[in-house]
Structure formats: structure tokens, C-alpha cells
Amino acid sequence: MGKLRYFAALWAAKLSVPALKLTGHNGTNYPGELAIKICPDFLKYIGKPEKIIAVTGTNGKTTTCNMTVDILEKAGYRVLNNRFGSNINSGIATSLITGSTVFGKTKYKLAVFEVDERSSLKIYPYVKPDYILVTNLFRDSIMRNGHPQYIADFITRAVPKSSKLILNADDLIACNVAPENERVYFGIKQMDTDRVECINLINDMQICPVCQGRLKYDYLRYHHIGKARCPDCGFSSPAYTYAGDNIDIHNMTMVVREHDDSCEYKLVSDNIVNIYNMVSVIAILREFGMKHDDIRRYMSTVSIVNSRYNVTKQGDIRIIMHMAKEKNALAITRAFDYVISQPGKKELFLMMSCLNDEKHWSENTCWMYDCDFEFLDNDTVTRIIATGPRAKDYKLRLLLAGVPEEKICCVKDELEAVDSLSFEDIDNIYILHGVDSLDIANKVRDEVIRRVREAEKR
């Protein structure tokens, strides 16, 4: 009965793909949803590639997966992935369906899947990756994930014993998942910009997990990311297998050290978050068996996906779109920190809009108070435009952070908010948008460009 139900699910799902195209729907998740609805253990039966790499964690999953897939494809591999689908069980199922024959046999030898942390228990019993990379574990949406240790326990319970783990040694929450599994570690050695005390509102790793003594950080980068040890019992951050070192932002280079070997890479971004993503990709590909020289050559041709970060120059003004995931205090704080670290005067749009929440609106805005809006009380930021459904919430949070009210504009309509720009004595206009607000953010960018052009003609 199980096999009959499986084939019924497979063929129904495959037939849904052309049907969705004919009706003008993307349907990136629907075939998998349909298959699992008909056959709840569909993932057990569908054919899978010989080698599977999975990437999970709070932040950086998509960028890390995209870079890994891009490099592997440039190296000549055919890679099954869920780049254009979701990262939950139905999204993985959709990818496997589209990558299989009508009899469910896979057409690929290699897959790279982005996996949602909470979906681990629904995916890993059936899809057993050879390698699982955990980028980091932070506080995420309180409505979904709560505390990062809760998610770490979730992953630990789900990870197959056969999977080799690639873990962030600078994250003492992430690097301690599934302690019985074989593992290697990546990280970034001490930088000139590091400190020993946390300046962020939250640090979820202050207490030793062994003896409950207070941890001491030899260096700390942000939140709980850094190198820590316990003076009482000797617990400490693990040694790096793959270490980013000698990071030179001016020349955009980095050395990756591995045992007695080292290789210099060109940085794909000057943002520390993406430097971590880059080191993690190198770790994945080295574990997969690629040579440093090949990784370096192919990595020099890849870039951060435009939906995450892109820059348009119009006259003397740079218009920067920067994704800052709504309801994710850590992702938004990282975006704020990066913006204020950049040279020049800036005007900012805050439009992390939580648009999808409007269907089932929640007044839970507690995540904003985990987020370091205080960073925006900075002399290089001349104006902040709070816009979209959360405009008033952002204005209140900015005021509580000490940002002068005269710097804040609050306009609910995103396109009307463009009128609040001064276009005077500024070098950069940042549009900080969430996942839900990408489409409207693109329209705002286009309108900003049009206004800058008009200003240039006057």
C-alpha cells in the first residue's frame, strides 16, 4: 500500500508542474506539498543523489548554499538544489520530484539543500546528508524559534549519525550540536576590530555549558560570536580546521589556513557576515574534495545574490539595497552595524515590513527590542525613513534608542516615503528591506533613482 500511495503521489506531483506553468503559477513548493499530503512518508521512497550536502542555521543559509552550488556547477558538477523553492520538507520534496524520472529515480549524483532548522525532524529521517554545515545559531523570530539552544537541541535530535558536521567554531551554540557526530570546524582568527566585551543588547552564550561558570572571551566579534573559554573548568572554543586569517578589507583579500597549508582568496564582500559565509563555503568544498586552487579560481567569479545586496550608482549617490530579515533581531543588527561602518553620509529606509503577517496580524514586536537600533544614533546617518506597515513601531523604537526625532520621518506608504529624502549632502541611500518586502523595495529603489536623475537636471 505504501508503494502504491507513493507512486500516486509522485505522478500527481509531476503532473502538477506543467499544470502550474499553464496557469501562470510558479508553484515552487506545491508539488512537494501535494506529494506529502497524498503520501506522508514520500521522502522515504523518492530517489536521492549519491552525495548530499545540507546547509542549516539561523543566518547565511541561502547565501552559503547559492555560492556552493555556483562553484560546484562552474567546476562541472550537475547539482540538484532548492535554490528556487522552500527549505522545508515540501520544498526538498519538490526538488527531488523535479530531479527524478517518472519512476522516481534520481537524475543527479549530487545535491545541495538549504534546510530550515525546525524542519530537521521532518527531513533527516529520510534525506541523510553526507555533510551538514551549521552556519550559526542565533535568536530568530520569537514566534517560530524562541531561544537558539532550543533550535540546537532540535538539530541534535534530528541529525543522522552518519552525517559529518561542518560547524562554526566561533559560535559555541552551533558548534556543540550532535556531539557524537564526526565534525570539523571553521572560523575567523582574531581581527583588529574585535573586542572582549559584548556591546550588543543580547549575548546568548555567557555561561559555561559544562560547569555553569561565567565564560571569558579572548576576543568577541558580535553577540556571542568569538573565542571563549571557562576559567573554572577549562571548557573552550574548539580549534579551527579551516581558519580565515589576515583579512584585509582595503585589498579585499583573506588567507584560509588549513593544518600546515594556506591559500589566499579574494573576498566576495567586505561584510563580516559574508566573510563567514565564504569561509564556510571553502570548508564545505574542501570536505567535498576540491583543491584550494580550484575553489579560489571559481570563487573569484561568484557574487552575493542581488536580492541580498546590490548597489546602483546614480550621479554621486549610491543607492544600496540591503536585506535585513524582518523579525530576526540578529540579521537586522548586523545590517545596521554594517551600514554605520561604511564611509559617507547616509539616508536610510527602514522597510522590514512583515508583509506576510498582515494575513494573520500579530502585535508581537518584542524582537525589535533585541535589535540594536542604538547603532543608528550615529552622526553619519542624517535621516531615517520608517515606512510600511511597521512604520510607527520603528519610529517608537528609534526614539527609545536615542535617535533625535528630527532625523526620523514616518510615512506608511512606501512610495510616498521617497518624498522624505533630502538628496542633499549625502553619499548613500540605504534601502533596508525584509524578505516579504523585496518587490516594493525594488519599486522604491526605482523611484529613488528617478528622483536623483530629476535632481541632477535642476
Image: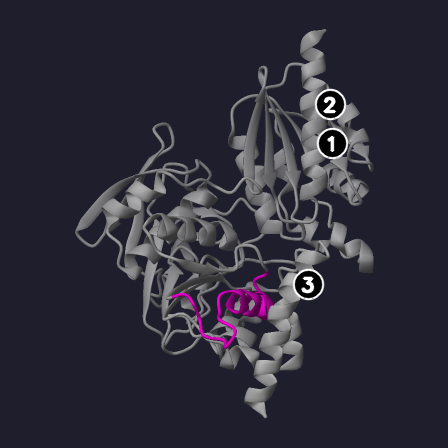
Q: What stretch is highlighted in magenta?
A: 86-108
Q: Is residue 95 magenta?
A: yes
For the residue carrying disc 1, how many other residues have a C-alpha within 10 Å: few (<14), some (14-19), or many (20+)?
many
Between the C-alphas of marks 3 and 2, the distance is 45 Å
User: Pointer 1: what residue?
Assistant: 385
User: Pointer 2: what residue?
Assistant: 421
Q: Residue 19 has which mark?
A: 3
* Location of residue 424 in the rendering, given as x and y in whole percent from the top left corner: 68, 14
Between the C-alphas of marks 3 and 1, the distance is 43 Å
Question: In percent of the image, x 73 and y 29: which residue is there?
Answer: 404
* Location of residue 116 in the rendering, given as x and y in whole percent from the top left corner: 55, 64
* Location of residue 94 in the rendering, given as x and y in whole percent from the top left corner: 57, 66
Q: Which label's residue is closer to the chain start, 3 or 1?
A: 3
Callout 2: SS: loop
Callout 1: SS: strand
Q: Which label's residue is closer to the chain start, 2 or 1?
A: 1
